[in-house]
């Protein structure tokens, strides 16, 4: 996600999800738990940073763009599967 990206959120989300699904399919052999966790955390951080810039949020953005909101309401694909009740 580039800082100069002005495409609608739906297009940005769809392209990111496409890349994440492809990555998961390519690397699904072997032990993936640690890699998936690292990628999910990185994606969450970068999406939050992108949205903070786009919406001119001056804080860290964790309240406005929580993990639950990013992977739930905003529809970003999570390699480790949907969030459970614990939010892990």
Image (cartoon, rainbow, N blue to C red):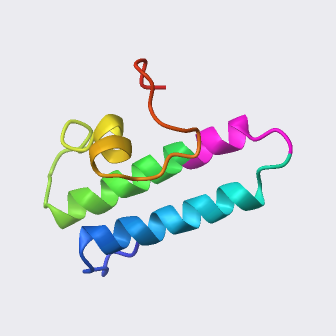
Q: Quadrant of residue 34?
A: top right
Horizontal relation, residue 10 to residue 78: left or right? left
Q: How far across and down, in percent of the image, does residue 39 sit?
A: 59, 49
Residue 35 to residue 56: above or below: above
Residue 17 to residue 42: above or below: below
Main SS, magenta region, reads helix
Looking at the image, which is closer to me, 65 or 27? 27
Q: How far across and down, in percent of the image, does residue 44 sit?
A: 42, 48
Q: How far across and down, in percent of the image, does residue 54 sit?
A: 20, 66
Residue sitting at the far top: 86
Residue 76 to residue 53: above or below: above
Q: Residue at x 18, y 45 (%)?
A: 59
Horizontal relation, residue 52 to residue 27: left or right? left
Q: Which residues are magenta?
A: 30-39
Total numbered badges shown on the rendered structure: 0
Residue sitting at the far right: 30
Q: Residue at x 59, y 59 (%)?
A: 21
Looking at the image, which is closer to me, 12 or 25? 25
Q: Residue at x 37, y 65 (%)?
A: 13
Q: Quadrant of residue 85?
A: top left
Q: Is residue 33 magenta?
A: yes
Q: Is residue 20 magenta?
A: no
Horizontal relation, residue 7 to residue 87: left or right? left
Q: Residue at x 39, y 75 (%)?
A: 2
Q: Quadrant of residue 68?
A: top left
Q: How far across and down, in percent of the image, does residue 1 sit?
A: 41, 71
């Amino acid at each position: 996600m580039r800082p100069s990206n002005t495409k609608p959120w739906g297009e940005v989300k769809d392209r990111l999800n496409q890349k994440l699904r492809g990555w998961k399919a390519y690397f699904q052999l072997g032990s993936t738990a640690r890699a998936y966790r690292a990628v999910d955390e990185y994606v969450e951080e970068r999406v939050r940073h992108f949205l903070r810039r786009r919406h001119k949020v001056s804080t860290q953005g964790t309240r406005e763009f929580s993990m639950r909101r990013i992977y739930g309401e905003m529809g970003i694909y999570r390699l480790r599967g949907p969030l459970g009740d614990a939010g892990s």
